[in-house]
Image (cartoon, rainbow, N blue to C red):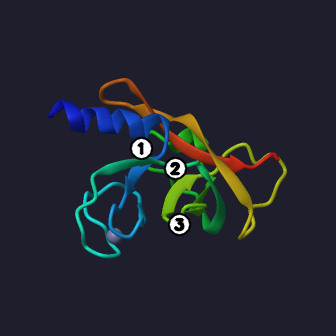
Amino acid sequence: MEPSRNWRLNQQRYSLVGEVCPNCEHKIFPPRDVCPDCGQPAHELFKFSGHGEVYSFTTVYHAPAGHTEDAPYPVAIVKLDEGPLVTAQLTDLGERQVEIGMPVEMVTRKLGSDGERGMLVYGYKFRPQLH
Ligand SMILES: [Zn+2]
């Protein structure tokens, strides 16, 4: 794996980094180096605020391997303030019911463990915005 790609993946692990189109300023996530809006190359990194709202959600009852201890858990499509939709697990809900339009913010959490290699897998989840 080339170093720049590796760096980019590390950035994604702890914050929501995508790209911004220099032509139309469309915010891109996940990064794909081409603007989906105007088709121009987009290599400029853009760090998202991590804030958004629940666009739709579902509950996962049959978790994939490595996630079974958490099931059932809610998974949402979050519409970021900057526009893109991302799919992520919701966390820290407490007694709260998930609702469409609920304001949420990104947190970095342990997602599970990779059983074969014994590695912990980290990634982003979203929790209700407290302010
Ligand atoms: Zn564009």
Q: Amino acid at mark 3?
A: Gly
In-front residue for pair 38/109:
38
Q: CA distance from mark 1 to mark 2?
A: 30 Å
The spot of residue 43 in percent (x, y) is 27, 52
Q: Amino acid at mark 2?
A: Phe
Query: Helix, strand or loop at disc 1?
Result: loop
Kindly identify the residue that appears in the image at 80 percent across and 46 percent down: 130
Query: Helix, strand or loop at disc 3?
Result: loop
Mark 2 vs 3, N-terminal side: 2
The spot of residue 7 in percent (x, y) is 29, 32
Q: Which mark is residue 84?
A: none
Dot 3 corresponds to which residue? 83
Dot 1 corresponds to which residue? 65
Would you identify the image quadrant in which residue 59 lies?
bottom right
Q: Is residue 1 left or right of residue 81?
A: left
Q: Is residue 58 left or right of residue 3?
A: right
Mark 1 vs 3, N-terminal side: 1
The spot of residue 122 in percent (x, y) is 47, 33
Q: Amino acid at mark 1?
A: Ala
> Seen from this angle, which residue lies furthest left?
2
Dot 2 corresponds to which residue? 48
> Seen from this angle, which residue lies furthest bottom?
38
- Look at the picture and state if 75 lies above or below 99: above
In-front residue for pair 73/127:
127
